[in-house]
Amino acid sequence: MTVLVTGSRGAVARNLVALLRDRGLEVRPASSTPGDPQTVKCDLTDPTTFPSALKGVTSVFLYAEPACADAFAEEAARAGVEHIVLLSSSAVLIPDPESSPLAKSHLEAEKALEASPVRATSLRPGSFAGNTLGWAWSIKSGQPVGLPYPGSHNDPIHEADVAEAALAVLTDPALGGRPYTLTGPQSLTFAQQIDILAEVTGRDITVKQLSRQEWKVEMAEYIPASYADPLLDWWQSNDGRPVEITQTVHELTGHPARTFADWARDHAADFTG
């Protein structure tokens, strides 16, 4: 078994590569910008990089890039790939996913794999706990964290749990071929996550409530305008409303999902260093 892990510089993929190697499996890390000789080039927007990356591969962990997902699936089939595990998003489950750029991009990647003869499994995490790293600069510099909806709930999941779920479906054929919605173990507001980070880091962290427009101006350098309003709409819809939690991480990995406090302890240095 040889597993191609795309996006190998990402948090989930790094964890997955380590887990696969611990199992003694052959791993082929891949990136659009390889930084070492052990990493192959696989730019998910450039089909010319697909054949060499996929040669001899039996399974793939695939990041959701819709631009050339059809071409990737076709090349994977030609290469004899048996299973593709897609890192999708629970955003595809919203009532009108085509109206949200984030949901639509993941949905298009899922549809491309569904049309392929290669067996495909979609992992659909909700909110990554790592999204809060966007607050790190403010926390390290003692500045308030600017939030438009501090009371908005989400389901922060540890990237290590997503990687372990991917390991499970990659190594157990009985688990493949269907989607899985992954969440953390708690529905937490942004304000509650701030409180947990304050407790873990020992820092006094304050929140500055922003208007939607103020937040868009602050984040313009990091979040494309086409994504900003759908994201704000999603947060507004969950303002004061807990989100649904699944037990899928436990079912796939055999242990409860790690809490946000667990994640905060694992990443405390990112907010204090």
Image (cartoon, grey):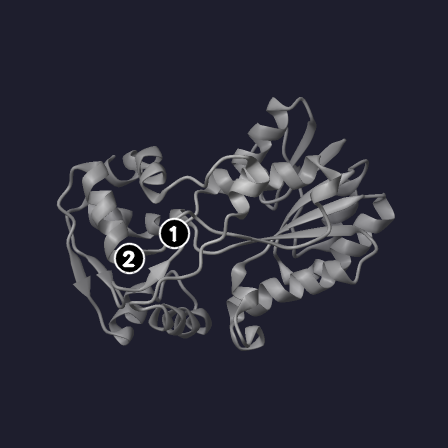
Q: Is residue 107 above or below residue 36?
A: below
Q: Nearer the viewer, residue 10 or 147?
A: 147
Quarter containing the C terminus = top left
Q: Position of residue 158 (x, y in %)?
A: 43, 43
Foreground pick, 214 / 171:
171
Q: Quadrant of residue 41?
A: top right
Residue located beneath label 2 in the image: 190
Q: What separation in Å lies between label 1 and label 2 (alpha carbons)? A: 11 Å
Residue 65 in percent (x, y) is at: 62, 58
Q: Kindly tell me whether residue 9 is visible in this rendering.
A: no
User: Does residue 11 lie above or below 149 as drawn?
Assistant: above
Q: Find numbered disc 2 in the image and state the secondary structure of the residue it sits on.
A: helix
Is 105 left, or right, of 220 in this rendering? right
Q: Amino acid at mark 1?
A: Asn
Write down the residue under mark 1: 131
How far from the left and from the top, in percent, is residue 173?
Answer: 75, 40
The answer to whether residue 106 is seen in the rendering is: yes
Q: Residue at x 61, y 56 (%)?
A: 64
**Mark whose residue sits in front, 1 or 2:** 2
Kind of residue indicated by mark 2: Phe
Give me the residue at 40% from left, 51% from top. 156
Q: Quadrant of the N terminus?
A: top right
